[in-house]
Amino acid sequence: MLQALRDAGELSLGEARSLTRQLVENGLTGTLVEMEILAIRLRRRAVEVIVAPAE
């Protein structure tokens, strides 16, 4: 997950770790396009991803 997030957003390792923690605990919020692009990158690395509307 860290590498996929770093590649998607050109993040530092610390930023990617923080974003990974947020993703696992609460999920991420963004536009459908942003989330689908991230989901594609994560799925390529065998990470199960669900993109759904925020509640």
Image: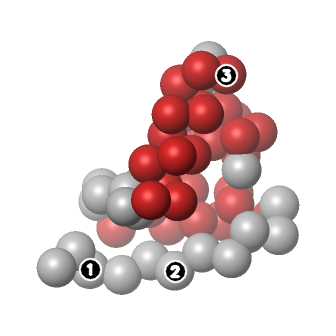
CA distance for labels 1 and 2: 10 Å
Up/down of 19 relative to 26, above or below: above
**Which mark is first along the chain, 3 or 2?**
3
Q: Residues within 10 Å of mark 2 (few under 14, many from 20)?
A: few
Q: Residues within 10 Å of mark 3 (few under 14, many from 20)?
A: few
- Tag 1 residue: 53
Query: To which quarter of the image does residue 29 belong?
Result: bottom left
**Residue appearing at x 57%, y 46% in the figure:** 20
Query: To which quarter of the image does residue 45 belong?
Result: bottom right
CA distance for labels 1 and 3: 28 Å
Whole-percent x and y of residue 15?
Answer: 53, 25
Report the amino acid beneath label 2: Ile
CA distance for labels 2 and 3: 24 Å
Residue that lies at the very extreme toward the left in this rendered image: 55
**Which mark is first along the chain, 3 or 1?**
3
> Marks 1 and 3: which is nearer the front?
3
Q: Is residue 37 visible?
A: no
Residue 44 as seen in the image, left or right of residue 11: right
- Tag 2 residue: 50
Secondary structure category for the residue under label 1: loop
Whole-percent x and y of residue 14?
Answer: 59, 21
**Residue appearing at x 44%, y 59% in the figure:** 25
Report the amino acid beneath label 1: Pro
Whole-percent x and y of residue 51?
Answer: 44, 77
Secondary structure category for the residue under label 2: loop
Up/down of 44 relative to 15, above or below: below
Residue 44 as seen in the image, left or right of residue 1: right
Report the amino acid beneath label 3: Leu
Up/down of 10 relative to 39, above or below: above
Residue 48 as seen in the image, left or right of residue 15: right
Whole-percent x and y of residue 27?
Answer: 40, 62
- Tag 3 residue: 13
